[in-house]
Amino acid sequence: MAAGCVPVGATSVPRGGRGWQTYGDTDRGPTLNPLDPAWSPGGSSAGSAAAVAAGLVPLASGSDGAGSVRIPAAWCGIVGFKPTNGRLPARDRAGLNSPGVLVGDPRDALAYFDAVTGSEVSAVRPAYPLRAIWSATLGYADTDPEVAAVAHRSARCLAEAGLITLAKGPDLALADPAPAWTALRAAGSSPATPSSADVSRVLTTNEERLRDCFQRADLLLTPTTPHPPHGHDGPGTRMSVALTWAFNLSGHPALSLPAGTTAEGAPVGLHLVARRHEERTLLAVADRAGRELNPGRHAPWTATASGTHRASRG
């Protein structure tokens, strides 16, 4: 409120104890995706994403412990931002859950970041083109080929616009974060003090490989999710968090931008990851990238078969 925002209400989240539920189930029924009521809006920040995508509010807060801001942003065709872990107080004892924000415009995410961190500095002007590494799977995710193609097409669009150069070389191969994330969350311990040899191996391996990645590049690009939005019956055995939760373990800031749609019109997100504490560079790139991928921005974002844009309200 001190920054000029007016809270208007609370939004839905999944009920507790439902495992990998990535949709909002309430006593009034499931939370609907404004792009198509048959789709899940993602989660766990389901209601926040739906409220922004429907144009009810320009900004809504969320919690991102495994992708719970970035996944609903991707599936609702908006922007979801997770800062560096520890930049803001963690919302769980394991330190995996970072406060985040869902917005229609990346500049609103920057305003949020300034307000919650209490810092206001001059705008970052990255020296374009930034070096970027693309990975469709991070070496372990079961990513749908069509989802990967849509996200990669957006990455190429950014390269053609002069914002990035896509590095050539072997695909980035991280260790699957599932066992480490699960163990740390269950134990409520700190990622700095892994509770088992397996957890330590995953953390050490990924730390080394991400250090090498960000020595060679300024950004890492992936699809936000490995598959399109599922229905309200849930994801089945698919892991919607597969491409996001590695960065809750590593702590890197990350953001999802609308990247376009599949042939059936399902929204796809482009996932941008930056070096730790380089949120302002990430947000500056997202602002420029959003204008390239989604010209003529008017709230809220809506998806079309040829891309993603924002429809004006009368």
Image: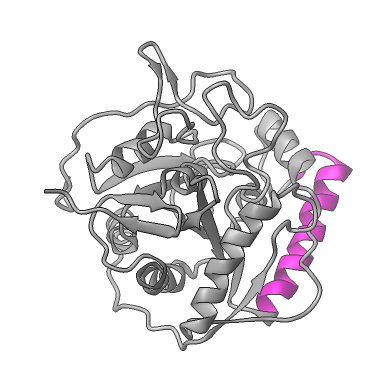
Closer to us: 189 or 246: 246
What secondary structure characterizes most of the magenta part?
helix
Q: Which residue is drawn at 42% across and 33% down?
A: 46
Closer to us: 122 or 52: 52
Closer to us: 41 or 204: 41
- The answer to whether residue 161 is seen in the rendering is yes
**Residue 232 location in percent, x, y?**
52, 23
Residue furthest out toward the right? 197
Q: Is residue 54 positioned above or below 118 on the image?
A: above
Q: Is residue 234 positioned above or below 314 on the image?
A: above
User: In the visual, does 176 lie left or right of 119?
Assistant: right
**Residue 262 location in percent, x, y?**
55, 51
- Magenta residue span: 194-215
- The answer to whether residue 78 is seen in the rendering is no
Magenta-span inclusion, residue 212: yes
Quadrant in the rendering for residue 155: bottom right
Quadrant in the rendering for residue 179: top right
Q: Which residue is drawn at 45% across and 53% down?
A: 305
Magenta-span inclusion, residue 185: no
**Residue 108 location in percent, x, y?**
28, 58
Count every numbered label the image shows and give the total.
Answer: 0
Q: On the rendered image, what quadrant is the N terminus found in?
A: top left
How is the model colour-coded? Answer: one colour
Q: Is residue 83 positioned above or below 182 on the image?
A: below
User: In the visual, does 118 lie left or right of 136?
Assistant: left
**Residue 60 location in percent, x, y?**
31, 43
Residue furthest out toward the left? 314
Q: Residue at x 23, y 43 (%)?
A: 57
